[in-house]
Amino acid sequence: MLKPALVIVDLQKDFLPGGALGVPEGDQVVPKIETLLNLEKFPWLAVVITQDWHPKDHCLFALRHNAEPFTEIEFEHPCGEKNSKTGEVKKHPQTVWPDHCIQETPGADIEPKILDKFGNSVAKVVPTAVVRKGYLKDREYYLCFSDCWKVHHTEIEDFLMEQNVTDVVFVGLAYDFCVLHSACDALNSGFNTYVVRDCCKSKRPTRLLM
């Protein structure tokens, strides 16, 4: 028997058209995701909304490095973990971004129609959670389960396991970054994992063949 949960990824003002890091046509997924929140049609065991929640001095903000947004910079492991073969601190190239989803700013707000239905309808029927990510300033969180180094873990996995969820369905923004990375992490954590492609939009759609 399926025990499904819906995870709505980063449906926030800054990721919608006109936002600081707007996803092209991102607003088109809002009514489709609203439909998925109809519990009479879709009997979710639990519903989660993830929320990018960055401090203003987050390491992945391009301005901190006097760099152009969307370029790559090499970052060291935040805990200084070393490569066992070379003895050097592990490094990983990552894209730097315009400032976005800064804590306690309007850009970090969850899309109001989704938040209203989530809080005033869904939460009265099934367990819900808002899972914030990206609040540690020295690392990125494309995944909603953990940071990109797999050091710090959010509460989402424990929440899903507490609800006895076996199947996780992902929707939201952006498909080519946080949605796919989070889906892969859910799969690696042992959940049957699905992405509703029609309820996602990509930041860089021309780079995807999926």
Image (cartoon, helix red, strand yellow):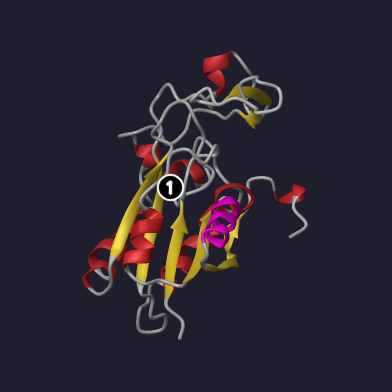
Quadrant placement of the C terminus: bottom right
Figure quadrant of residue 28: bottom right
Would you place residue 195 above or below residue 178 in this image? Answer: below
Could you tell me if residue 113 is visible in this image?
Answer: no
- In this rendering, is residue 77 above or below 39? above
Can residue 196 be seen here? The reply is: yes
Q: Which residues are magenta?
A: 180-189
Image vertical order of residue 2 relative to residue 107, above or below: below
- Quadrant of residue 1 in the image? bottom left
Left or right relative to 162: residue 54: right
Tell me which residue sits at (26%, 70%) in the image.
121
Which sits in the foreground, 119 or 78?
78
Which SS class for mark 1? loop
Q: Main secondary structure of the magenta part?
A: helix
Q: Is residue 173 left or right of residue 8?
A: right
Quarter of the figure with residue 6:
bottom left
